[in-house]
Image (cartoon, rainbow, N blue to C red):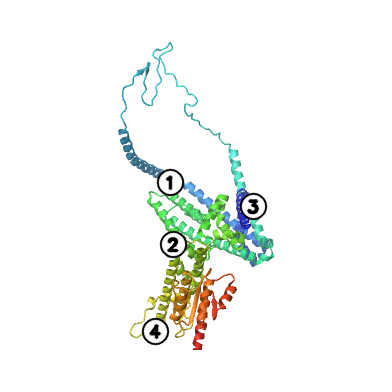
Amino acid sequence: MASEPLSIARRFYLIASLAITVAILYFARDLLIPVALAVFLSFLLAPLATRLERLGLGKIPGSLMSVALAFVVIVALGFLVTDQVIKLADQLPQYEDNIRSKTQALQHAARNLLNRGAGPLRSFSESLSDKEPATSQSPPTERLGHPEIVGPMLTPPVSAAPDARGPAQPEPPSVLPGDGPVPVRIVREPQNPLAYIAESLSSVIGWLGTAGVVIVLAIFMLVQRRDMRDRLIALTGRGQVFVTTRAFDEISSRISRYLLMQLMVNTSYAVPVTIGLTLFDIPNALLLGLMALFLRFIPYVGAMFTAAVSILLAITVMPGWGGPLGVLAFFIVLELIVNNVIEPWFYSLGTGVSVLGVIFSAIFWAWIWGPVGLILATPIAVLLTVIGKYIPQLAFLDILLGGRTQLEPKLRFIQRLLAMDQAEAAEIAEEYCCRESLLSLYDNLIVPALQLAEEERHRGQIGADQESFLLQAFREIIDETAAQEIAARAAQTALAEPPSAESPPTPTDAQPRPAEHRSTRAGRGALPPAPADVRIVVLPAGDEADELAGLMLEHLLRAEGYPVDTASVERLSSELVAEVQEQSAQIVFISALPPGALVAARYLCKRVSSKWPDIPILVGLWNATGNVAWARERLESCGKTKVVTTYAAALAETVRAAQSLQFTT
């Protein structure tokens, strides 16, 4: 009872800590953004600084030179971009007529569309007005000396008698509070040029100050990078030296790999953009190529922004609509090639962050830090993923952001079955069998999943209908994978046999290579040939899950040539014992799947051993955990009994028992 309040308190502390962390990140962004940019720049320049140090420049000169080279490159690119922007601004007035004609064409098309849609609406409105009851249309009459006013126009009464000052004039309507809105026009005072210059200079000085802080911090981080690493390792404690060192190495390698791969991908994207827009005769294609190179560091948004600017520029400078549509098609094709060919090729090693992790990280850091957060989103996601991998308390970060599937295969398998999706569960089992072997499939996937289902059934979490579906699905998947394995082995045997004189040899291209690969992975020939006249019978201990576990053993033994039969669970205990005599079995295998099968297995074992004390009995206590030694001791006290917990051990013990019988006879 004390653990529940403790878990609630821990959850509260975790949520409170996350809320405080997010608040600090948001309100302290002016302080944290330069630090994050400096760390990002130091990771980017660390390989260059290390290489310069190895060339003999020393730690401080190498770090200063790497930062200076980066600063020179950034300034040169800034001047190049500024020059391109100025040239583009000078050329835009030349296309004023083109812009005006396309704007008028769009307005004309929109007006025609609205008129086309307004016609049916007008007809519908007129039809409704025709159906309204007729009202009296009598001419206006005078009441109390005033004309009756019909319609929305109100005419103030005119005095009949002129006064001495001239003809009668209508009285101006008086405007009272509440009669209607009074138009208000806000006139801004002209801004002082000196104030405008001061505001612009303060903004520029602020950006320059931030850039200076980032450069100074990056230099110190590069110079003191080894000392900072030692300090962080000292903070974690001496007992965590190996884990902390591996974490730092993995963070550095992943971020450096990401930056290098992203630069290569961006270059492979920017070069075709520059060449393609030049062929489309778009002015300042180099500017758009540089935009594509740098903006693509921003996940998903940068490429779309570059494409949008290029298409707008094409609409501005190209006559007609064919050219802009061609530019749009060019970007669509280029994105498909880069996303499906170039990026998978460069990212074969991967950064360890899933696609959804990158998207969520970009959304979160854009909300916290704005455009700078978009640039730093992926490196921060890599950092958090590695931290979650090595710190158990923060493992949820690796689960949420990591690129590998966090759910174990057995849990994915049983989850698909619980969701009544037998097709996907069978696909998971088939892929696992092709990747590993049939023996590994049974030991590491199906038996653990079947055991989980049994545990939930004993807890009452699975209903009768769901239990029936699960057992039938397990049986069909077991039979299907066994049939595929037998077919694969038969194909391998046919390939291994020499061709007969009557039939021509099969061409090499027509040979079933997947079957050969699969049977090799299955471990054909792992067991010696089955001895003659050795029959094996498998008895389920209690329920249908035990029978399914025995059925898997039957498939494995039959694949190796051993004659074996599995009794039905519907038979009584006395009938199961009689099955041994009916089959003339030399080896008895009792299949028991925990939990709850130990008592039934021991009872059946005692009955068989009491009637045939010389028959070797093997008990499969499949995937047993906990006090296995105690269970083994209780079972092996019954005659010639041997307990195994895996199918690999069951096959080995079966071979040993069969060889012992052959040697005895």
Question: Which of labels 1 and 4 is toward the front?
Answer: 4
Residue beneath label 3, please?
A: 213
| SS assignment at label 1 | helix
Distance of label 1 from label 4 (alpha carbons): 78 Å
Eye-nearest disc, 1 or 2: 2
User: Residue flagged by tag 1: what amino acid is it?
Assistant: Tyr
- Amino acid at circle 4: Pro
Q: Residues within 10 Å of mark 1 (few under 14, many from 20)?
A: few
2 vs 4, front mark: 2
Label 4 residue SS: loop
Give, as a three-letter code, the residue at label 3: Val
Residue holding disc 1: 95
Instruction: Give the label, 4 or 3, closer to the camera.
Output: 4
Image x and y of residue 204, in percent: 60, 46
Q: Earlier in the sequence, mark 1 or mark 2?
A: 1
At 38% from the left edge and 44% from the top edge, which residue is drawn? 106
Q: Position of residue 228 (x, y in %)?
A: 67, 60
